[in-house]
Image (cartoon, rainbow, N blue to C red):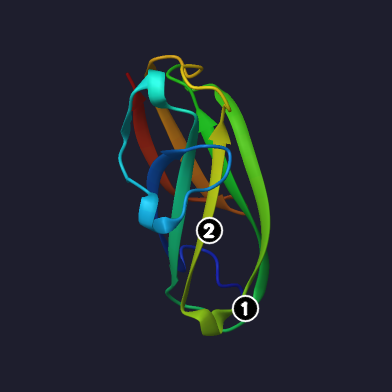
Amino acid sequence: ISILNNKYNCKLKLFEGADLVPDQSKRIYTTNFVSKNTRYIYVDANCAIVDGTANESVNLFFKYFDSENSLINQNKHPLNVDVSWGNFGYTSGWGYAKKSTWEPGEYKIQFFINDEKLDEKNFTIK
């Protein structure tokens, strides 16, 4: 029995940071970023296992799109989900080591487990 098919309740939160993921206590969640200060845009995906009876190996996908809705990056992360967890979180990011590399505009990140889109979040670079 699969635990997919909308049996996760996932929500995304975004934050900015350097090439190493900042500690949770240092994360400032927002959807508005200033180009001159922005390096990597990170995503915390927090998921609740709403219904599931079997452990499952899945692929997490984080897809970044520019203002023209063109895919500019995709991160794939395999994960073994244990239903006894009740919920799980995963952090992924993409960007640049140097500040001021992001072009101003509207972007979005979509989050998928296997081929199922579970959430999306728009963000702005000013």
Q: Earlier in the sequence, mark 1 or mark 2?
A: 1
Image height check: is 77 above or below 5? above
Q: Quadrant of the C terminus?
A: top left
Task: Report the residue marked by disc 2.
Answer: 90
Mark 1, secondary structure of its residue = loop
Left or right of 17 in this view: 98: right
The part of the image, by quadrant, that contains residue 34 is top left
Q: In the rendered image of this protein, does residue 80 appear above or below residue 53? A: above
- Image x and y of residue 89, in percent: 49, 63
Q: How many marks?
A: 2
Residue under label 1, please give it. 1
> Do the CB atoms of the residues marked 1 and 2 lie less than 8 Å apart?
no
Q: How far across and down, in percent of the image, does residue 2 sit?
A: 60, 73
Locate the N terminus and report the quarter of the image it occupies: bottom right
* Residue nearest the observer in this picture, 25 or 119: 25
Please provide percent x and percent y for residue 102: 47, 19
Describe residue 35's horizontal placement relative to residue 1 as left or right: left
Q: CA distance from mark 1 to mark 2?
A: 23 Å
Q: Nearer the viewer, mark 1 or mark 2?
A: 2
Q: Is residue 36 above or below residue 46?
A: above
What amino acid is found at the position of numbered circle 2 in the picture?
Tyr
Residue at 45%, 14% (x, y): give it.
103
Label 2 sits on a secondary structure element that is: strand
Q: Residues within 10 Å of mark 2 (few under 14, many from 20)?
A: few
Mark 1, other Cα within 10 Å: few <14 / some 14–19 / many ≥20: few
Depth order, front residue of 77/41: 41
Q: Give the residue drawn at x 60%, y 78%.
A: 82
Position above or below: 17 against 86: above
The image's mark for residue 118 is none
As drawn, is 22 to the left or to the right of 80?
left
Which residue is found at the position 55% from the left and 47% from the top? 92
Q: Amino acid at mark 1?
A: Ile
